[in-house]
Image (cartoon, rainbow, N blue to C red):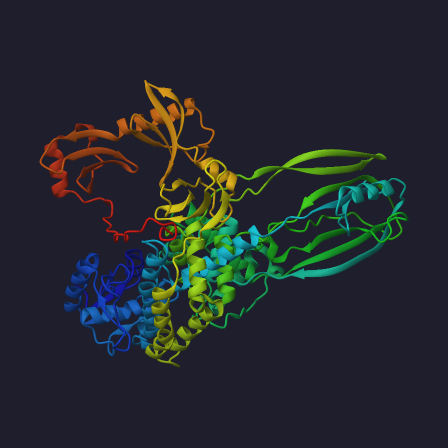
Amino acid sequence: MGKNLVIVESPAKAKTIEKFLGKDFVVESSFGHIRDLVSKDMGVQVDNQFTPVYEVPAEKKDVVSKLKKLVKKSTQVWLASDEDREGEAIAWHLAETLGLDVKTTHRIVFHEITKPAILKAVESPRRVNQDLVDAQQARRVLDRLVGFELSPVLWKKIKPGLSAGRVQSVAVRLIVEREREIQNFTSKATYRVVGTFVKDNGKKFNAELNHRFENKEEALAFLENCKSTDFSIGKVDKRPGTRNPAAPFTTSTLQQEASRKLGYSVSQTMSLAQRLYEAGLITYMRTDSVNLSGLAINSAKDEITSQYGENYSKVRNFSTKNKGAQEAHEAIRPTYMDRQEAGADRNQQRLYDLIWKRTVASQMAEAKLEHTTATISGPNLGDHKFVAKGEVIVFDGFLKVYLEGTDEEEIEEKNALPALVQGETLAPHSIDATQRFSKHAPRFTEASLVKKLEELGIGRPSTYAPTISTIVNRGYVEKPVREGVMREYQFLSLQKGEILEETKTEKTGAEKGKLFPTDIGMVVNDFLVEHFNRVLDYNFTAKVESEFDEIAQGQITWNSMIESFYKDFHPNIEEVTENAERASGERLLGVDPDSGKNVYTRIGRFGPLVQIGEGDDEEKPAFAGLLSGQQIGTITLEEALELFKFPRSIGDYEEGEVKIGIGRFGPYVLHAKKFTSIKKEDDPATINLARAIELIEAKREADKNKFIATFDSEDPIVEVLNGRFGPYIKQGRNNFKIPKDVDPKSLTLEDCKKIIAEGPKGKGKKKTTKKAAPKKKSTRKSSK
């Protein structure tokens, strides 16, 4: 056993570091945090200066026990968790839990896992920085206070099982407000005119009219004028231009660019970056900094010079504009600039390639361009002119390696123009007037949401991925694939002196990877904005982040910051709990023509629904669930009434009736008292008997193949099943892995018992206990 114990967060990181240290060092992993706020209660002593109450969770007790034994055998302990606030807190919790003296225990940090960086860190250890610990502790305590006190209000005022969070609720607010903006948007149609002109030498180029017509009549009148117009080139403007490379990656810009270019989610990007970092391939992946070290700049210069030549190299020093940036270290970059390819799998390799190119491009010369703008006019055009824009790359510079992506959905077209001379006459090849429709603001993607949160100063590098995962997992936001609908548009074209008119079709509204608020997300957001506007205020949330920064810098004490927040927050909780009305997003759609009763839509206990009648009527109201894609805020009376046609009978099969219904888990086929889910691509309103039978038979086949063997043994019974990840043994609520060299079909009950007794346990279903919902009175208002 070595004399020095080094503790890091992850086994992968430990494995990499162990290669660089000698035989006198043992490197072990804490597997992340080993201690957290107690889970049963609030975990914060409000009356004792908000002192947190920590516990070692059950799943970490073995880890702690092992580390304590290693500590006893070691003469020196080195805490080597990550260098951000979260890592500092992990180091502090390790010291506290393992009985280490924080005043003497070595704390080492490094921005990259390379031998020089590790050895340098060991040569210059420091102590645990209590200010950084307090900043993380303040965030954890504040978030627990908000979640613990706010969530029960939502259970009482909306529905059980809901939750709220300081940053997550603000993220949902952004998405909801964008959705409302889209819902209130009215598209306007105009006609865009583009001409294709021909020079005497036969070369063609395009130019767009500097005006859009509001209707077909105006567009036709313009094309008529063009019939007798002699076109010529007016002013030709040529000017040199340059384009500079983007700064090296920060956490948020890496998340944004990996989403645009690679299609990765924010959490996927961070997971891949974590693995690259732990393997010693890139620098630390949680950073607000765009700085590069002198060594990195010189290495990039050597690489650029050898690969592309000296004229492509330009040393650049970038400075961090983010005032709240908490890291003073480097941007995300490869640890070795001369290594162009790296990564254990294709996804890691693609992300590494992106980081390498971005870093190298940041140290390259600017691209030199020549911009050309030419106007084309004619005697019958009045003030209207065609404008041709072109761009020629004179020297590609950094563009040889990398060009930053954009969130813009439409990019102005720029083509390489032929040589144009003022006064030169042109022949029109065709002049097209195409009906175009104005677009609403785009919905947020994960990347653009991260960008917006960063612009507002909300959250920090380590919070973006878990924030987005949380709001999706809790059902406040979803990422559906919208196929879009076909739309007609008018196309007018002047060709060879004749105007052609045509009605064309195009798909509109197709969206993938966009963030949509769910009904429950919108109702929760509206309730929180109405009653807890301070907590959801963008400026207030950003101010809290800056106060965390002040704590980290030792400027304010964390207890006083929490107290300042809580003295207003807690009375607000009590007032809303006592006096606020229940919220359900209820909307009166109109009157049912058959019964003459009101039709409502709202959030019910199991989700969005429509209701005919009042809760206090003598006759019980009728209820129906909404279909996928329908929302309580936009559903119409006609669409709502269609839902009451379910369950509908579509015929008989095997002497039994087949019905289509909509339940709390979505549309289903009911036959012989068995339910079969209807696929997303099937419309429950139009599905026919043949398709329903197909689904029934497919489920029967899946159920038949699911069970390999069932053994009648003492309770609970033992089953051998086919699962998503292969065969496994199930006993009660527990699942057990079957060794790879064992044929599942050959297993006997004794074999299964042996595997259960000796084999590693698989992941079973988590046992969850839900708080019983309070009984509701039979009135419409109380059922909100």
The image position of residue 734, as x and y in percent, is 19, 43
- Report the number of discs: 0
- Residue 282 visible somewhere in the drawing: yes
In this view, 271 is above or below 248: above
In this view, 296 is above or below 262: below
245 sits to left or right of 598 = right
Q: Nearer the viewer, residue 517 or 326?
A: 517
The image position of residue 218, as x and y in percent, is 80, 45
Q: Nearer the viewer, residue 578 or 31?
A: 578
Q: Which image quarter: residue 559?
A: bottom left
- Tell me what residue is drawn at x 32 percent, y 73 percent: 133
- Tell me what residue is drawn at x 9 percent, y 36 percent: 714
Q: Which image quarter: residue 127?
A: bottom left
- Residue 328 visible somewhere in the drawing: no
In this view, 656 is above or below 306: above
701 sits to left or right of 361 = left
654 sits to left or right of 374 = left
